[in-house]
Each structure stands twice: as structure tokens, then as C-alpha cells.
Amino acid sequence: MARHLATLGLAAAAGLVLGGLGAAPAFAEDVDMAKAKQEGTVVWYTSTPIEQANKLARLFEDQTGIKVELFRSGGSAILRRFYQELSAGRVGADVLTTSDPAASNVMAEKGTFVPFKPVGFDKIPDAAKDPDGNWIGQRLNLITIYMRGDKVAEADRPQKWTDLTDPKYKGQMVMTDPSFTSLQLSVVGTLSQKLGWDFYQKLADNDIMIVQGNQQVSDNLKRGERLIAVGALDSYAAQDRLSGHEIVTVYPKDGTFVIPSPTAVVKGSDHPNAAKAFAAFMISPDAQKIFPADGGYSARIDVDPPEGGPKVSDLTIIPVDYAALEKQASKIKDQFNDIFR
């Protein structure tokens, strides 16, 4: 299993220019599309940002005529629902997309997913997929520090994670809850090991606001309730800039997180062929170009980074030990809650 976020493996994801697109969806080559269309529906559980999720669903429906039934929430909430249904002996999702490689690795080992290597599998770097095809990265998530450029002077902008403990930032910061957002679980689990839990205690002393998800972080900054987003998904910052907001991203000198979002075909689901079609579509060039257009990062090595965004290869990346993270997940959430609640 791909346990660590390999810097060299993911660096390639910022590389080459997207080639020309054919008239027919290339993903159909490895999928029984006749059966998929007979099934007519695919049920997708996902933590993909809602606008991107809707764009992907509409494009797939337009290309195939297969309806996408979408359930979208935070990564941890998605997994809770998925686990509850499995415990009850029911498979509700055909395709599962979260931002939790640790949990995806564990489920792969338990045989929860259908191994599947569609067209384009070779275009996903090794660190962003399971080698046997149990899950494939849908996108890369850059976790950064971003802020209101019109409210935080350039000289006062934090450049490292440790800068955030400075009392001058008291009452200015906001971050997500790892009990709701899988991406934040990776950040908190890693930084608490790297910097110690005292780092988070100092953030609490600085009156940092805790919200559920990244949309709430973005909304807080746009309303001016808080000025600095801590360990937040940078594609929201990019979208806000595209909308005309003065949002500045800092890629911390002591490391940026780059975390893949696994997509998997769920074993025993009601629409197995439509599930494969949709999972294959997810890494097709048509689908993958949606992410950089919205300020995010494609999982494919042949798709450029978003306009104005750095190449992954130019960043200092903080590695995440997903195997250790999965074992400690409950303890990490409990410790976080003890500090902030």
C-alpha cells in the first residue's frame, strides 16, 4: 500500500501540458458501458467540494446518460455513514471518494473495494494510488495557510506553522475540525507529532475558531470574521481569488501538505458497472481538467497546476505516515477535542 506521501512521486503531478481530448470518453475501453447504461445510476459518496462534485456529476451524465446520485459531506462524516451502513449489512455507495488515504488503505486490506485499473491509471503517480488499484487519487489537496491580503500586512503574514503561535494573531485565525474533515485529521495527526500538542494548545490560547469544514473557513474570511485560515484546503482560496476576493496563500517554509483524495469502487454495490464507469471517468482528462480550472490540483502527471499556482515539485512537502495515522485516529480526535472543547 502507498503508506507515505512520497515527495518525488507527487511532484510529477504538476508536470506536463494536457494533451488533446478525443471525441469519445477514453474510460469506456475498460468498462462494460452497455451494462453500465442498463444500470442507469451510480451512487457517489464524496467529500469533493460541492461545486466540483456537481460539475463532475453533470459532465458524466452528459457523456454517458447515467444518473449520478450524490451524497456530499465532510470526509469524516462520509466515512461514518459508509461504516454504519456496512455494519448494518448494507452497501449504499457505488463509488466512495474521501480525502483519507489511511482509511482507504485499511478498507482495501479488508477487501471493501473492487481492484480496478482503468485507462489513465499509469498517469497517476504511485504515491496517489493503491498499487493494486483498490483506490485511485481523484485530485491532490494542498493544505496551506491563507489569509485576507487586504487585512494582514505583508510584513505580518505568518511564514511557518510555528509562527501562528505568536500572540499578535490572537482572535484572527480559523481552522477545520478533524472529527468532520479528513484532511484536517492528517494535518493535526502529523503536526502534533512534529511540533507537539503544545502547538495546538498555543493555538487555543490564541482564540482560534474551530468550524466543521473548509467552506466555513472560506466564508469566515470573506465575511471578515477571521483573517487567517490555518491548515485549510487551498483550492477554496484559489476559488475566492477568482471571485475577486483579496486572498493570499502562504506555502509554509516548514512544509506544505499534499494529500490525495482516494476514489474507490465499492464491492457488492447495486450498480457495479456504472461504478467502474464513473471511477474511470474520474481520472479521465475531461474530468481532471476541472480541478486546475477551479484552482485545485489534478492527480494526473500530464495536467498542469492551476494558473498562478506553484508546481508541487517546487514545494517543501510534509510527509504523512498514513498507517500510523489510522491507528491513532480516535486518539488524535479525542486529544484535539480536549484542547478545543
Image (cartoon, grey):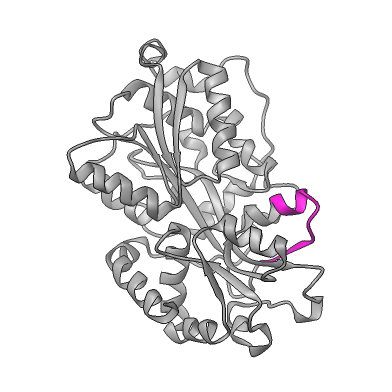
Q: Residue furthest bottom?
A: 167
Q: Which residues are magenta?
A: 239-250
Can I make out residue 282 in this image?
yes
Q: Nearer the viewer, residue 16 or 36?
A: 36
Determine the residue positioned at 51% across, 16% down.
64
Q: Judge left or right: residue 111 versus residue 324.
A: left
Position above or below: 242 against 96: below
User: Can you give x and y, in whole percent of width and height, for residue 206 in the image?
Assistant: 58, 85
Q: Where on the picture, by quarter, is residue 133? A: top left
Can I make out residue 301 in this image?
no
Q: Where on the picture, by quarter, is residue 246? A: bottom right
Q: Judge left or right: residue 173 versus residue 224.
A: left
User: Can you give x and y, in whole percent of width and height, for residue 110 in the image?
Assistant: 21, 46
User: Can you give x and y, in whole percent of width and height, for residue 204 in the image?
Assistant: 51, 82
Q: Nearer the viewer, residue 171 or 291?
A: 171
Does the magenta portion include 170?
A: no
Position above or below: 239 against 233: above
Q: Where on the picture, by quarter, is residue 45? A: top left
Q: Judge left or right: residue 88 versus residue 63.
A: left
User: Can you give x and y, in whole percent of width and height, for residue 293 in the image?
Assistant: 69, 40
Does the magenta portion include 248?
A: yes
Q: Quadrant of the C terminus?
A: bottom left
Q: Judge left or right: residue 334 versus residue 237.
A: left
Determine the residue positioned at 39% across, 22% down.
274
Position above or below: 297 against 331: above
